[in-house]
Amino acid sequence: MRKWGIELLFLIVVIIWGINYTIAKYGLEEFTAIEFTALRMIAAAWAKEQISLQQIIGGVIIFLGLWFVKSEKFEAELVASEHISK
């Protein structure tokens, strides 16, 4: 088993990377890029160590606040461009 240890580890890494692209492809069909990235980061943080519900709620509030600011800025740019084009 020791002889094949490194090769087996390389094979596992290749399989994980291959699966990651497939998951990303289907994930981006269902979510926007920022939503999918947020879900991945939450899953990675949760798997690494147990974080409290309070920390999760705080992160969600910050994420939603930043998302709101981004969407308001985008709407303002659309309104401004409509007035300029008229």
Image: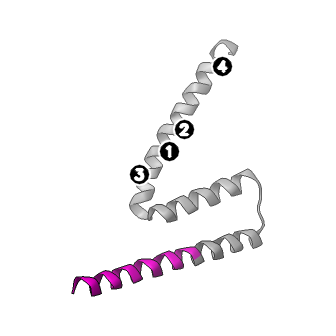
Residue on which the image places disc 3: 25
Q: Earlier in the sequence, mark 4 or mark 1?
A: 4
From the image, state whether disc 4 or disc 3 is nearer to you: 3
- Pointers 2 and 1 in contact (CB under 8 A)? yes
Residue 37 in magenta stretch: no
| Residue at 34% over, 85% down | 79
Q: Earlier in the sequence, mark 4 or mark 3?
A: 4
- Badge 3 density bin: few <14, some 14–19, many ≥20, Cα 10 Å: few
> Which segment did they paint magenta?
66-86
Residue on which the image places disc 1: 20
Distance of mark 2 from mark 3, alpha carbons? 14 Å
Q: Earlier in the sequence, mark 4 or mark 2?
A: 4
- Mark 2: secondary structure: helix
The amino acid beneath tag 3 is Lys
Residue on which the image places disc 4: 5
The amino acid beneath tag 1 is Asn
